[in-house]
C-alpha cells in the first residue's frame, strides 16, 4: 500500500495503461528481492533446498523473493556472504 505523500521515484509509462508509478520503498524491496532470487538461482537450488541449506524459513524466503515483504538489512548481508562463500556458510550453519 502506498502512503499518500510518498513520492514516486519511477513514474508510470504513459503509453502503458497497466503500468504504475513506483515509490522508493517499493523499488528498494524489489532490488532486495532480485538479489535474493539471483543468489539462490546461481546456486541452482530450489526455494526449499536453499531454505534448508541456509536455515531460512521457506515462507520467509518466498515472501522476500516475491517482494511481498522487504528483506531486512541482515538478510541482504547474509545473501551477499552466501553469494561469495556458499560452501563455507553451509558448513557454518550445519
Image: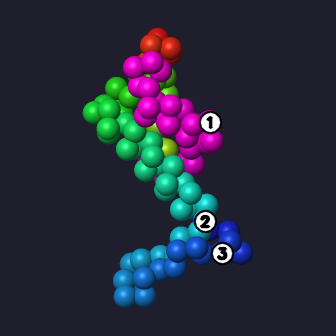
The residue that mark 1 highlights is: 74
Q: Main secondary structure of the magenta part?
A: helix
Q: Which mark is residue 47?
A: none
Give the crowd class for mark 1: few <14, some 14-19, many >=20 residues within 10 Å: few
In percent of width and height, residue 46 lies at: 31, 33
Which residue is the site of mark 2? Answer: 24
- Asked whether residue 2 is drawn in magenta, I would say no
The residue wearing badge 3 is 7
Q: Alpha-carbon distance for marks 2 and 1?
A: 20 Å
Q: Position of residue 62 (x, y in %)?
A: 43, 41
Dot 2 alpha-carbon crowd within 10 angstroms: few under 14, some 14 to 19, many 20 or more: few
Chain part drawn in magenta: 65-89
Q: Say if residue 12 shows up in the picture.
A: yes
Q: CA distance from mark 3 to mark 2?
A: 8 Å
State the residue at coordinates (40%, 20%).
Answer: 87
Please, is residue 62 above or below residue 45 in the view?
below
CA distance separating discs 3 and 1: 26 Å
Amino acid at each position: 500500500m502506498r502512503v499518500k505523500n510518498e513520492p514516486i521515484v519511477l513514474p508510470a509509462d504513459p503509453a502503458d495503461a497497466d503500468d504504475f508509478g513506483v515509490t522508493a520503498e517499493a523499488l528498494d524491496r524489489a532490488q532486495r528481492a532480485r538479489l535474493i532470487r539471483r543468489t539462490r538461482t546461481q546456486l541452482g537450488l530450489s526455494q526449499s533446498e536453499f531454505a534448508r541449506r541456509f536455515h531460512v524459513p521457506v515462507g520467509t524466503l518466498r515472501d522476500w523473493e516475491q517482494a511481498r515483504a522487504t528483506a531486512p538489512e541482515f538478510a541482504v548481508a547474509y545473501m551477499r556472504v552466501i553469494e561469495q562463500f556458499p560452501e563455507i556458510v553451509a558448513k557454518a550453519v550445519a
